[in-house]
Image: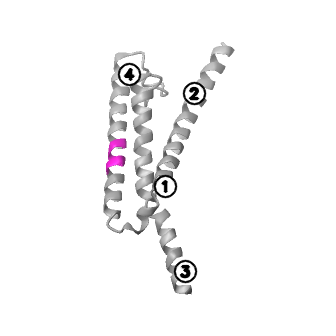
Amino acid sequence: MPERQASRRFAAEEATSRPRAPGILIGIGLGGFVDGIVLHQILQWHHLLSSEENYPKTTIRGLEDNTLADGLFHAATWVAVAVGILLLWRRTAKWRWAISGQAFFGWVLVRWGLFNLAAERRYARRAIDEEFQRRVT
């Protein structure tokens, strides 16, 4: 009987740990897609390098550099999703963990949230600095 309980415990642990890496990679990619497509392209709130003084988005050269950096960023997020899907595909050969699709989607959401938290923290800090400079001058 103890052997059966240990086996169940191992299966439960595996059900939540096996989708971790695919979930994290797909979360990075999806978070990057939303940031890049919605914030960079549609709303045009910022670009990847727009917070750097050497790459102003108000000049042609600065916009070209920002657009290139945005494209490389999108390519990297696409690779993260592709690798995450590949890992997920390879791990589906052992269906014991497949009962926990919730764990996989949980890891996707965790990583997506951490991506957006880090990105927005950087832009919020810049906005606060700009507002401070505007009020001081």
| Helix, strand or loop for disc 1 | helix
Foreground: disc 1 or disc 4: 1
C-alpha gap between disc 2 and disc 3 = 53 Å
Secondary structure found at label 2: helix
Residue bounds of the magenta highlight: 77-82
Amino acid tagged 4: Gly
Q: Which residue is mark 1?
A: 102
Mark 2 and mark 4 lie on one chain; the one further toward the N terminus is: 4
In terms of secondary structure, what is the magenta stretch mainly? helix
Count of labels shown? 4
User: Disc 2 residue type?
Assistant: Arg
Q: Earlier in the sequence, mark 1 or mark 3?
A: 3
Is 93 left, or right, of 17 in this rendering? left
Q: Which residue is mark 4?
A: 62
Query: Mark 2 — residue?
Result: 126
Mark 3: which secondary structure?
helix
Q: Secondary structure at mark 4?
A: helix
